Amino acid sequence: MNTKSQADASSGPPKGIGPMQRREMWLAYLMLAPTFAIILMIVAGPLLANFWISVKPVQLADLRPPTVLVNERVRGRPKAPGDEARLEYRLRNSSQDEEIRNVTLSDVVPEGFTVTSHSEGCSLNGSKMTCDLGMVAPGWRGDVELVGTVSQAFLDANRPERASEPVITGDANNVLTNFEFTFENFSRIFSADEFWSVLRITFYYTIFGTGGALVLGLFAAQLLNTAFPGRGVLRGLFLFPYVSPVIAVAFTWVVLFDPFSGTLNALLTKMGVIADPINFFGQRAIEFSFLGIPMEFPLALTTVIAFEAWRYFPLSFLFILARMQSINTDMYEAAEMDGATPLQQFWYLSLPQLMGILSVLFLLRFIWTFNKFDDIFLLTGGNAGTRTLTVDVYEQGFALSNLGAGAAVAVVVFVVLVTFATLFIRFSPKEEGL
């Protein structure tokens, strides 16, 4: 008996799942299916649409499929019953590139209007008019006209031609929904010299903006981790850059750094630090020489990076401070008794405990900064060497009306961030003990 029990125990639990567990599993999947569908529509829907547009030569005007536009109006100005009038339909193809096939126009003749003649290709069935226009060429314009007499009912009505809306039908190729794909957008952006410059500026802006926000947040957390009078007030003030509306703080920085009426330029000029005002947001670079080597300092980009670090360091400050306050203070007391300096305590005790939260913050801030658009657009508009990939998406899609190229740049942003996040999560440092 004991031998049998030991054999059963050594064999372990039965493999696989039984019929009851299988039914419960499928029931759980069925109950979660609506949630999965909503998440897929919210997350995957726009992403897939962006990939779809990136492989199509889509212009901004292509968002509306080609159609025949119609404008209906009464000509002749009849004033008494029996006067002649013309009901005119002015038509045009909305597309300059695509033809529209099997075009038909249908409408209801206004009450009190008796048709005596009509354009070729039109027919009347009671009060309903139908016109077969066939194929219309790109950019086509034409007219359909009904000639007739009016009655008092027509004259008494307010805009009788608006009583019914004309209906246009037709078939046209839609570049947005057809299954013709091309890599022309990617070829165009990768072959442009400015793309690689924009990519380099984006990495420069992201790395230094993220690093600056983390360093400032680390110093602020270290400063406010000790107890002193007024610490709560300072913690609240430190959150001001992050909670303030971006348009307000961006406008404030533009005013402070203005070369003509800015406070900073006025102070530096009065103190004799500079001879002429500096256009911090409008000057691309400052040339200088180091050991006889001519170099350039990216002024506008550095100023934008400084704004990025100042605006977003409070988020890092909050997370780092919360982690610092959860660290056991006994080891700091022991290190202090052993003669460790504050710098040694920070380097050998605090920093290893903070590596986990610093890694998470760096990943999040890198992704958010890489995708940042509003800060740069409000400060410089992407000029003076501050054009990043997100600004390039806007420029391609809306300034140049090339949605396909803008979507292609957005795909590049997605691929870069997914690659970075995957590698970072794989090789990022962990806290000690994890």
Image (cartoon, rainbow, N blue to C red):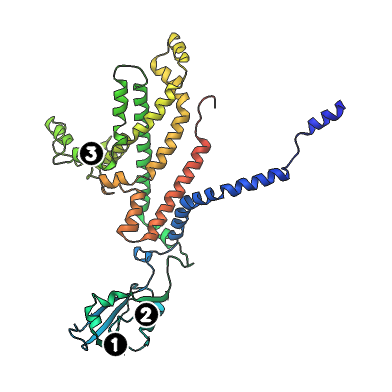
Separation of residues labelled 1 and 2 (CA atoms): 19 Å
Left or right position of 149 against 406: left
Task: Read off the residue under disc 3.
Answer: 253
Separation of residues labelled 3 and 2 (CA atoms): 58 Å
- Front of the two marks 1 and 2: 1
Q: Earlier in the sequence, mark 1 or mark 2?
A: 2
The answer to whether the residues at label 1 and label 2 have Cβ atoms under 8 Å apart is no
Q: Is residue 294 visible?
A: no
Q: Quadrant of the N terminus?
A: top right
Q: Which element type, helix, strand or loop, lies under badge 1?
A: strand
Measured as percent of width and height from the top left, residue 87 is found at 27, 82
Measured as percent of width and height from the top left, residue 147 is found at 27, 88
Q: Earlier in the sequence, mark 3 or mark 1?
A: 1
Separation of residues labelled 3 and 1 (CA atoms): 69 Å
Identify which residue, 176 or 37, lies in the foreground. Answer: 37
Q: Which element type, helix, strand or loop, lies under badge 3?
A: helix
Which residue is at a point 29% across and 41% down the rendered structure image?
246
Q: Answer with the quarter of the image where residue 368 lies.
A: top left
Q: Answer with the quarter of the image where residue 82 lies.
A: bottom left
The residue at the far left in this view is 270
- Front of the two marks 3 and 1: 1
Task: Read off the residue under disc 2.
Answer: 105
Identify which residue, 77 or 207, lies in the foreground. Answer: 77
Badge 1 local density, few (<14 within 10 Å), some, or many (20+)? some
Task: Read off the residue under disc 1.
Answer: 114
Which residue is at a point 34% across and 29% down the rendered structure image?
216
Q: Which element type, helix, strand or loop, lies under badge 2?
A: strand
Type of amino acid under label 2: Leu
Measured as percent of width and height from the top left, residue 153 is found at 25, 81
Badge 2 local density, few (<14 within 10 Å), some, or many (20+)? many
Identify which residue, 53 or 151, lies in the foreground. Answer: 151
- Front of the two marks 3 and 2: 2
